Amino acid sequence: MFLARVPTTRVASVPRRTVFNAVQRKRDQEIAEEKSKQPIALPPAKRLAIVTCMDARINPFKQLGFKEGDAHIIRNAGGMAKDALRSLIISQRLLGTREIAVYHHTGCGMVTFQGSELKKIVKWSKPDDAACAQQVDSIDFLEFSDLEQSVKDDVDFLKSSPLIMAGTKITGWIHDIDTGKATRVA
Ligand SMILES: [Zn+2]
């Protein structure tokens, strides 16, 4: 007996063996074993938004002792305020946060490259693609060379932004990757 041949065009375009697939499968098993959870309110309980780096070594909930529902964690490369603005507006105007902590860290990859070089790398990968060149040229990668200054600049940026609500408490911090300690610098 023959098994019907299933068209594979669509299926083949979706990668099945991904790291995330494996993580998700493990998580599904854990959820099945957990007790039922209490619902958590959508607005953050501490009315706080943290802007931090996507660095895999930063775990704000664990390192700052938060629990689910406590704060918005807005993450991007470097934890750059400009990049977080869209999310901050939503966080403040629709979900009630009234305090922002800019939370950068030692050993950040953002001090290790030049945006102009990164643009070249992207363009080299698709040398004949004008759309690629145009789009990457329009991106400011927001790299920096001075960590402490990057925090101060971001705090100043938020304090002077007309999009951030008046009266918002804004502070700036550096998380030490080696010790886990955070120091306020702005
Ligand atoms: Zn970083």
Image (tube, rainbow, N blue to C red):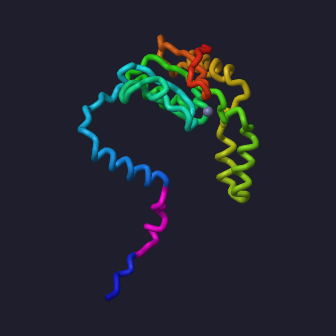
Q: Residue at x 68, y 57 (%)?
A: 129
Q: Which residue is drawn at 51% across and 22% down?
A: 163
Left or right, 81 with respect to 23, comes to right
Q: Magenta segment: does it hold 157?
A: no
Q: Quadrant of the C terminus?
A: top right
Left or right, 161 with respect to 136, comes to left
Tell me the quarter of the picture where residue 79 sits: top right
Q: In which quarter of the image is ligand 1?
A: top right
Q: Magenta segment: does it hold 11?
A: yes
Characterize the magenta stretch by its predominant secondary structure.
Answer: loop
Residue 43 lies, in percent from the top left, at 35, 26
Q: Which of 37 and 94 is in front in this view?
A: 37
Tell me the quarter of the picture where residue 106 sits: top right
Residue 144 lies, in percent from the top left, at 70, 29
Left or right, 56 with respect to 117, comes to left
Is the residue 94 above or below the residue 125 in the image? above
Is the residue 104 above or below the residue 130 in the image? above
Give the tally of numbered discs: 0
Span highlighted in magenta in the image: 7-18
Residue 56 lies, in percent from the top left, at 55, 38
Q: Which of 142 and 46 is in front in this view?
A: 46
Q: Which residue is drawn at 72% across and 24% down?
A: 146
Q: Residue at x 57, y 32 (%)?
A: 53
Q: Which of 26 and 68 is in front in this view?
A: 26
Left or right, 75 with respect to 69, comes to right
Furthest toward the bottom, the residue is 1
Q: In which quarter of the image is the N terminus?
A: bottom left
Residue 118 lies, in percent from the top left, at 71, 44
